[in-house]
Image (cartoon, grey):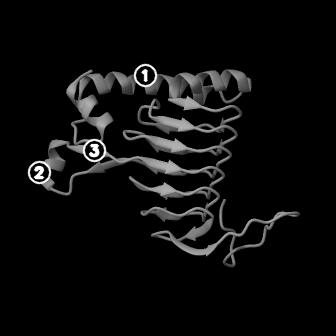
Amino acid sequence: MGENKQRMLAGDWYLPDDPELADDTRRRVELCAEYNAAAGAAPEERHRILERLLGSVGKGVRIRPPFQCDFGYRISIGAGTFINFGAVFLDCGPISIGADVQIGPNVQLLTPVHELDAERRRAGWERALPVTVGDNVWLGGGVIVCPGVTIGENTVVGAGAVVTKDLPAGVLAVGNPARVIRELEPRSGEPDDRPADGRPAVG
């Protein structure tokens, strides 16, 4: 394994313009294209493609194409998770998604961090910080999760929110930057579909 890939995997600063990483990118391009072209294929066939593309994928995971990522092998997805159209997961760093997660359309999970120093940024230096999404999280349409963020289990993030800092378990967060507006209490019986703040929380 070359130096830049080693540095990327370790979370250190690295140069992405690297032949070894370019080979990994070509692999991802081919597998993403195969998956996105297989929208009408049987679920078992689509799952087999995901098993080749991703680091790990649980039983019953559904991803509606188109789906794009950087490498694929740094993404793990727990059983029963649903990911809607247009997801973009930039997995230079690890992306860990728990079980039974609901992800709305056009959600972005982003791990790359670029240099603030203009000269080093121009030279191409970057690093990546992991993104972690806990079990039973619901991310609304258009949510952006920034590098290094962890979202606790059972949390709901409203449509269009930009998550720049960790969110605890069991809360509703909305806005840009996302802020917690209330805790979510466990309920039994009929589901609570009332808007939390005068509008649907997610999409």
State left or right for residue 59 relative to residue 142. right
Taking depth in this image into account, of 60 and 186 the one nearest to the observer is 186
Q: Quadrant of residue 28?
A: top left
For disc 3, the marked residue is 127
State left or right for residue 111 relative to residue 3. right
The alpha-carbon separation of the residues under discs 3 and 2 comes to 15 Å
Q: Position of residue 80 (x, y in %)?
A: 70, 40
Going from the N terminus, do you reach mark 1 or mark 3 first? Answer: 1
For disc 1, the marked residue is 27
Task: Residue at 61% x, 51% y: name it.
Answer: 105
Going from the N terminus, do you reach mark 3 or mark 2 first? Answer: 2
Task: Residue at 47% x, 32% y: name it.
Answer: 72
Q: Position of residue 39 (x, y in %)?
A: 67, 30
For disc 2, the marked residue is 119
Task: Residue at 64% x, 33% y: name it.
Answer: 58
Q: Nearer the viewer, mark 1 or mark 3?
A: 3
Most extreme residue toward the left is 119
State left or right for residue 28 relative to residue 183. left
Amino acid type, label 3: Arg
Q: Secondary structure at mark 2?
A: helix
Q: Nearer the viewer, mark 3 or mark 2?
A: 3
* Residues at marks 1 and 3 touching, judged by CB atoms closer than 8 Å: no
